[in-house]
Each structure stands twice: as C-alpha cells, then as structure tokens.
Image (cartoon, rainbow, N blue to C red):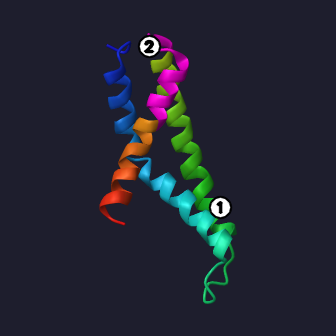
Amino acid sequence: MAGRWPAVLVANLLLGIPAVVPFWLLWFLAASWVSGPPAEENDGMALWLVIVVPVVGLYALLWSAVNRSLARRSSLMPRTYWLLGVLGTLLPTTALIIIYP
C-alpha cells in the first residue's frame, strides 16, 4: 500500500494537520521581525525563539522520519514523492488560509 500515491498523500495530509502550528509560529516570527515588535512589547524576540525552535524542530524530525520511511517503500519517483509529500503537508494550512483569511 505504501507504493501508491494515495498512501503518501493521506500520510502527509495527516501530518499537515498538526503542521498548522509550526507554520503559524514561523509566519508570526517572520512577520514580527519584518515589522518589528509592537511598541508595548519590550521583552524582545529571544523568548519566541525558545518557543519556536523546539516546536518546529520536533515537527521537522517527525515529518522527516515518517517520509523517509515511506519513501523507501514507495515505488514513486523521488521527485514525485517529495513534491506530493510537501503539497500534502501544506494543504491543511492552505485550506485554513483560504477559509479564514
């Protein structure tokens, strides 16, 4: 079953649901650095890095472990597999952006 593209898509869609949190944290961190922190917030950005780095790091480890395991058993071409994996992971976040702009 892991050799077919639906298994890859479903696995990455399921991984994409908790990925909303790390993607949001990265977006918020990038937006805060570009626009600067609000005037009433004088704690700096170091606290955000303490929160963002472990959350994004743990999710990246989970995502890469699952996808490396599936990629070894998949009969898809590597480029097709990783493209499908990334798009499947981004789909829940994209749907939330479209539904709740």
Please give the label number shown on residue 74.
2
Q: Where is residue 65 in the image (x, y as percent from the top left)?
A: 52, 28
| Residue at figure coordinates x 44%, y 47% from the top left | 19
Q: Earlier in the sequence, mark 1 or mark 2?
A: 1
Q: Is residue 17 left or right of residue 47?
A: left
Inter-mark Cα distance, 1 to 2: 36 Å
Residue under the image location 49 percent in, 59 percent down: 24
25 above or below 86?
Answer: below
Disc 1 marks which amino acid?
Leu
Q: In which quarter of the image is residue 29?
A: bottom right
Q: Position of residue 56 (x, y in %)?
A: 56, 49
- Per the image, the residue denoted by label 1 is 49
State which mark lies toward you, 1 or 2: 2
Where is 45 relative to 85, above or below?
A: below
- Considering depth in this image, is 29 or 87 the residue closer to the camera? 87
Identify the residue at horizontal 56%, vertical 36% (top origin): 61
List x then y, in percent, for residue 92: 36, 47
Stretch of the chain drawn in magenta: 72-86
Q: Nearer the viewer, residue 65 or 93?
A: 93
Residue 31 in which image quadrant: bottom right
Mark 2 surroundings within 10 Å by alpha-carbon count, few (fewer than 14), some (14 through 19), many (20 or more): some
